Amino acid sequence: MKKFIQPLVSVAIICICALYSESIFAQKTSPMSCNVCCINAGNDVTIACNGTATLGVHCITCPGSACSTAWSWSPSDYLSCTNCEQPLAIICVPGVYNYTVTGSSGGCPTCQTTTDVVKVTVTGTQSCCNGKASSFEEIENTNINVFPNPSGGTITVQLSDVSSNTFIQVYDVEGKLITEKKNLLGKTVDVDLSNNVKGVYFIQVFNGDMKLLNKKIIIQ
């Protein structure tokens, strides 16, 4: 019996290896077996209050297909952007947040997913908002103009009124303070960000402890 078992095992192993190799080859060459170009909101995540979470999954195209070039995230609360592939969320109020992303299938023949949802759970028992860069939620103010946006590096802030308590701060998407303008001498203030990395920032205007403006700006 031993003389017949060994050849059969060898043949079985060869067949399994051949099938596995064929499967791997198909995955690498056939768009029919590749779903990574589908809209994907990412895995559910739990973060601490005022923590940071990156939503979405970066698209890797398959042969014969293409990624979506248009995304729409909702709701917009606490997100760094709503029309990008992977927005950042900084949430300063504990709770459960469901974010939905929609877009095109990107041309994948087997990809029918154009909408996906990710759940972000924020731990804690009370708000940890500190009035600074606690969230990406924008606060508009018709009495304050910020331009140009996008900018090549210098942002101009025009204020309708200035007091000794008025100051300006700029934060990056990680909540880090980039620059601050105090003791303002006039109603027009230039903020130079030309030496900073290109990307998304938040410019905030305060009068004492009151936040008057929180606006997303883009340096390109």
Image: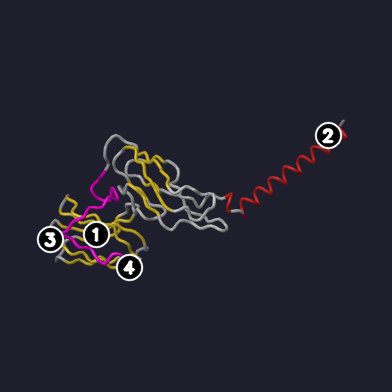
User: Magenta segment, which residues?
Assistant: 129-150
Gap between marks 1 and 2 measured at Cα: 78 Å
Cα distance in 3D space between marks 2 and 4: 73 Å
At horizontal 32% and vertical 37% (from top left) the residue drawn is 95
Camera-nearest label, 1 or 2: 2
Q: Mark 1 vs mark 3: which is more N-terminal?
A: 3
173 or 72: which is nearer to us? Answer: 72
Of tags 2 and 4, which is closer to the observer? 2
Q: CA distance from mark 4 to mark 3?
A: 25 Å
What residue sits right under mark 4 in the picture? Answer: 194
Residue 162 has which mark? 3
- Which image quadrant is residue 156 in? bottom left
Q: Nearer the viewer, mark 2 or mark 3?
A: 2
Image location (x, y in percent) of residue 161: 11, 61
The amino acid type found where label 4 is placed reads: Ser
Q: Check disc 4: other Cα within 10 Å, few if <14, some if 14-19, many if 20+.
A: some
Q: Amino acid at mark 1?
A: Glu
Name the residue carrying label 2.
5
> SS class of the residue under badge 3?
loop
User: Disc 4 vs disc 1: which is toward the camera?
Assistant: 4
Residue at image location 45% in from the left, 43% down from the top = 43
* Residue at 32% across, 41% down: 49
Marks 4 and 1, how far apart at CA? 15 Å
Horizontal and vertical percent position of residue 148: 26, 67
Amino acid found under the numbered disc labelled 3 = Val
Residue pictured at 65% horizontal, 52% vertical: 25
Q: Is residue 67 positioned above or below 192 on the image?
A: above
Magenta stretch, main secondary structure class:
loop
Which residue is denoted by mark 1 in the rendering?
180
Label 2: element kind: helix
User: Disc 2 residue type?
Assistant: Ile
Q: Position of residue 77 (x, y in %)?
A: 30, 47
